[in-house]
Image (cartoon, rainbow, N blue to C red):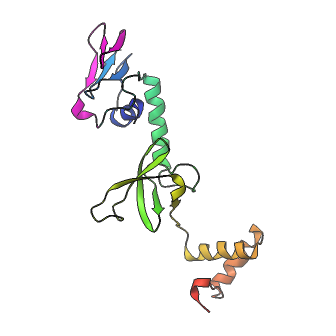
């Protein structure tokens, strides 16, 4: 996970006129002076104006040796995360499912907890006895079907009959009259 992502998740307020960096120890420093990265450590002309201790940072950023995060970058990432949380759970099967979405892998439901280089990371509590995390390509996952049995029947019937969307109400009337059968219903 990149430093800007970590800071957007962990930091509520940004120090005035500062840029953030992270040392290998996971400590985050905020500088408002010149600084550089030497021997695995970020150091400035003056002491950092604020810092976050390693115990408060969940992990080392993948880009810790190169990332210099500004307030503007942090704010943009926070807006992106807020928008993703607002739409969490809504995925149409295209692209990567958003973090927080409930998705299906084979016949097992799992929760998307992250992305890494195009891989979707899921919590697989129901799939394995003690729970675990696993990574998948988005093509291995599918959205959870939240349609009612009526909506499923109408969609399937319209697909089989290849009728226009305007017939949807007619199909609904057929279903409501009890005349609908699906192949799995038998007969």
Q: Quadrant of residue 75?
A: top left
Residue 49 % position (x, y): 28, 16
Q: What residue do we see at 62% from left, 84% from top?
A: 183
Say whether residue 176 is magenta: no
Instruction: Residue lying at the far front in this picture: please name it.
Output: 39
Toward the top, the furthest residue is 45
| 66 to 11, vertically: above or below | above
Q: Against 30, is 82 above or below?
A: below
In the foreground, 36 or 76 = 36
Q: On the picture, is 135 further left or further right than 142? A: left
Is 54 colored magenta in this rendering?
yes
Location of residue 67 with respect to 1 vertically, above or below: above
- Looking at the rendered structure, the number of numbered marks drawn on it comes to 0
Is residue 32 visible in the rendered image? The answer is no
Start and end of the magenta stretch? 32-58
The quadrant holding residue 109 is bottom left
Identify which residue is drawn at 50% across, 42% down. 83
- Residue 147 occupies which quadrant of the picture? bottom right
Q: Quadrant of the N terminus?
A: top left
Q: Position of residue 73 (x, y in %)?
A: 46, 26
Up-down: is 164 above or below 98?
below
Foreground residue among 135 and 158: 135
Residue at image position (49%, 38%) is 80
In this view, the residue farthest toward the bottom is 187
Q: Residue at image x 45%, y 40%? A: 81
> Residue 19: where, in percent of width, then height?
38, 19
- Whether residue 125 is visible to the viewer of this picture, yes or no, is yes
Residue 32 position, x and y percent, is: 35, 12
């Amino acid at each position: 996970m990149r430093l800007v992502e970590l800071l957007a998740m962990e930091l509520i307020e940004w120090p005035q006129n500062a840029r953030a960096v992270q040392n290998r120890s996971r400590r985050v420093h905020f500088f408002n002076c010149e600084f550089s990265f030497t021997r695995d450590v970020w150091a400035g002309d003056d002491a950092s104006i604020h810092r976050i201790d390693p115990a408060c940072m969940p992990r080392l950023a993948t880009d810790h040796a190169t990332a210099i995060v500004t307030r503007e970058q942090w704010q943009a990432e926070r807006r992106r995360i807020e928008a993703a949380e607002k739409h969490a759970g809504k995925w149409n099967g295209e692209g990567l499912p958003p973090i927080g979405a409930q998705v299906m892998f084979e016949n097992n439901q799992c929760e998307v907890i992250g992305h890494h280089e195009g891989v979707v990371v899921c919590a697989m509590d129901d799939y394995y006895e003690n729970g675990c995390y696993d990574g998948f390509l988005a093509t291995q996952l599918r959205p959870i079907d939240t349609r009612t049995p009526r909506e499923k029947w109408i969609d399937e019937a319209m697909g089989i009959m290849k009728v226009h969307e305007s017939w949807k109400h007619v199909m609904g009337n057929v279903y409501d009259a009890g005349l609908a059968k699906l192949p799995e219903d038998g007969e």
